[in-house]
Image: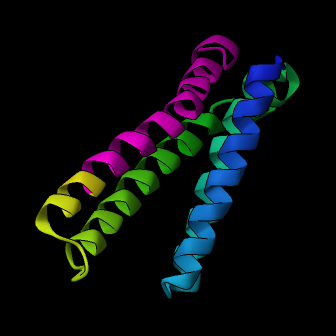
Amino acid sequence: MPWWAAAYTIVLVGLSTSGLIDDLRDGRSRWYLLTGTFSAAFSLLMVVAYWAAPLAQGLGFWVVAILIYAITWDTWSTALDLRSIDRDPELSEEERGLYGRFGVVFSAVVVAPAYGCGLLVLLERGGV
């Protein structure tokens, strides 16, 4: 794994951990935290599997389920986060819009490489 991919995994772990701590502080349920942890772990797994051919081969077509799960969870949890921003009385309408747009773009930029690795694992190393 090249240095930049390793750096991305460190950033991904850090941001995922920060997000889970934020969810815990917000009083999210245990199942919410658990499913978020799975999504973060699956995203990390897709990145590592891309660079570790034996792991990618071991995943086989399970990478499809992992990829669908991560995309579905991340989309749904981002929508929930946007709703919580909309209900924050301390934010102005302009701030809500700015935080919402920035949050969606930032989330997409952070997880896109993991999804890309998952797709590449599926297409290049999964035998499709």
Q: Horizontal placement of 48 versus 113: left or right?
A: right
Determine which quarter of the picture holds residue 20: bottom right
Place of residue 42 in the rendered image (x, y in percent of width and height, measured from the top left): 65, 47
Compared with 54, 40 (above or below) is below
Compared with 124, 57 (above or below) is below
Q: Horizontal placement of 87 versus 25: left or right?
A: left
Place of residue 54 in the rendered image (x, y in percent of width and height, measured from the top left): 87, 24
Please count the marks in the image: 0
Residue 107 among those drawn in magenta: yes
Q: Horizontal placement of 121 versus 29: left or right?
A: right
Compared with 109, 72 (above or below) is below
Picture residue at 50% right of the left edge, 88% below the top:
27
Place of residue 63 in the rendered image (x, y in percent of width and height, measured from the top left): 62, 35
In depth, the one of 40 and 106 nearer the eye is 106
In depth, the one of 9 and 35 nearer the eye is 9
Residue 124 among those drawn in magenta: yes
* Quarter that holds the C terminus: top right
Place of residue 16 in the rendered image (x, y in percent of width and height, measured from the top left): 63, 56
Q: Horizontal placement of 96 versus 17: left or right?
A: left
Determine which quarter of the picture holds residue 80: bottom left
Secondary structure mainly formed by the magenta segment: helix
Magenta part of the protein: which range? 100-128
